[in-house]
Amino acid sequence: MPKNQLFKVMPDMQIVQPLLEAFGLEDIDDSRYFTYQNMKDADTAESVQELREDLLKYYIPCKGKVYATTFTDKKCITILRQFVKPMNYKCLGIEKSIGGKKHMTYRLIPLDKEQLSPKKDDARLYVIDFN
């Protein structure tokens, strides 16, 4: 069995699905954006708090103490990121301006379709000279 720095039992859909629902997402393929305000409206921190005992079954004990004790919005995002990564998904955060204020927006994307990060071999270097 391969060793993991976070988990004693690798996450599966049995824990990921209720975690996604705590964020107001239907399933792992739900690619809607969500913000901290959406999380507050959905009571995400309270919902993840209710999953605490289940989360502790997956984390190694020292990581469980770090991540599954107090549940802030930021920690909930971290937990979501950790649990979707073994499913080959990524929780991508982007800062957007909404109504003149900056907000972090998040969404799930498959690791094989990282839409917002260009491939390094596709990048071209251009030099602009104003002389």
Image: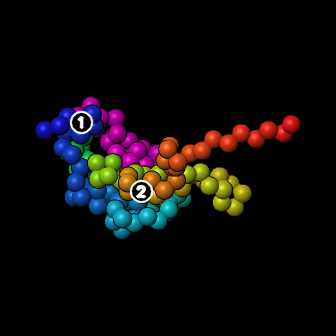
In the image, 32 versus 71, the foreground residue is 32
As drawn, is 110 to the left or to the right of 15? right
Give the number of the disc on residue 4: 1
Give the left or right position of residue 5, taking residue 128 as reference.
left
Mark 2 belongs to which amino acid? Lys
Q: Which quadrant would residue 127 be assigned to in this image?
A: top right
Q: Start and end of the magenta stretch?
A: 61-83
For label 2, count other residues whose C-alpha is less than 10 Å away and answer few (under 14), some (14-19) or many (20+): few
Answer above or below: position of 65 versus 115: above
Percent from the top left, x then y, of residue 51?
28, 53
Q: Is residue 44 visible?
A: no
Which residue does the image show at 34% across and 62% down from the upper left? 28
Q: Name the quadrant containing residue 69.
A: top left
The mark found on residue 54 in the picture is none
Q: Quadrant of the N terminus?
A: top left
Which comes before the other along the chain, label 2 or label 1? 1
Residue at the (79%, 38%) spot, across then down:
129
| Amino acid at the residue labelled 1 | Asn
Per the rendering, the mark at residue 113 is: 2
Give the vertical position of 29 relative to 130 (above or below).
below
Cα distance in 3D space between marks 2 and 1: 24 Å
| Along the line of sight, the residue nearer the viewer: 45 or 118 | 118
At 84% from the left edge and 39% from the top edge, which residue is drawn? 130
Looking at the image, residue 1 lies above or below residue 35: above
Is residue 129 within the magenta segment?
no
Q: Residue at x 28, y 48 (%)?
A: 86
Q: Residue furthest top?
A: 62
